[in-house]
Amino acid sequence: SLQEICFQMMELEPGILFKITGYIPDGNVSPIPRFHINVGKDEFNLGLHFNPRFNYYNDQKVIFYNSKVKDQWGEEQRDYHFPYSDLSTVSIIFEEKEFRIRLHDGYEFTFPNRLNLKVIDYIAVEGDFCVRKVDFK
């Protein structure tokens, strides 16, 4: 894993937008880049797991979305809108009933707030993705 950035005890309330900007380095550490963004209460309770797969086993150019409760994964959703060879920005809007994930081409995917989270305490970015900045609005 190239790097991990983790924010804890955030207490972000519904309506917050956070935008993660970065890049996948050329000649990256692994021949097939992999990274994910986790958002939730803590590492064992995730309201949102965002996992783009460029070429992972049989999954090519697909984004996986999931949730996790007490370290148990939920039912994953897949989205085949994959507009990038590299990923530059991901914006996540936390709302009471759902997460809205906006990609840098303007495309938006909605994932339900399955854990009924009232606040976001935990954000982690892990893998072959160099984070340049994180903005909160």
Image (cartoon, rainbow, N blue to C red):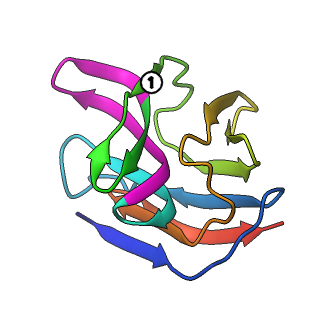
Q: Could you tell me which quadrant the N terminus lies in? A: bottom left
Q: Which residues are magenta?
A: 45-63
Residue pictured at 27% horizontal, 21% vertical? 59
Front residue of this view, candidates 69 and 22: 69
Q: Residues within 10 Å of mark 1 (few under 14, many from 20)?
A: few
Residue pictured at 33% horizontal, 70% vertical? 3
Q: Can residue 103 be seen in this snapshot?
A: no
To which residue does mark 1 refer? 77
Front residue of this view, candidates 61 and 31: 61
Amino acid on which disc 1 is placed: Gln
Residue 15 in percent (x, y) is at: 84, 56
Q: Left of 40 or right of it: where is 105?
A: right
Front residue of this view, candidates 137 and 115: 115
Furthest-bottom residue in this view: 9
Residue pictured at 65% horizontal, 29% vertical? 109
Instruction: Quadrant for residue 25, please give it.
Output: bottom left
Q: Can residue 134 be seen in this snapshot?
A: yes
Q: Could you tell me which quadrant the C terminus lies in? A: bottom right
Q: Left of 63 or right of it: where is 94?
A: right
Residue pictured at 45% horizontal, 75% vertical? 6
**How many numbered circles are shown?**
1
Q: Is residue 101 magenta?
A: no
Residue 45 in percent (x, y) is at: 41, 58
Q: Is residue 52 magenta?
A: yes
Residue 112 in percent (x, y) is at: 62, 34
The main secondary structure of the magenta stretch is: strand
Q: Is residue 96 above or below residue 104?
A: below
Q: Left of 98 or right of it: where is 28?
A: left
Residue 116 in percent (x, y) is at: 62, 49
- Secondary structure under the numbered disc 1 in the rendered image: strand
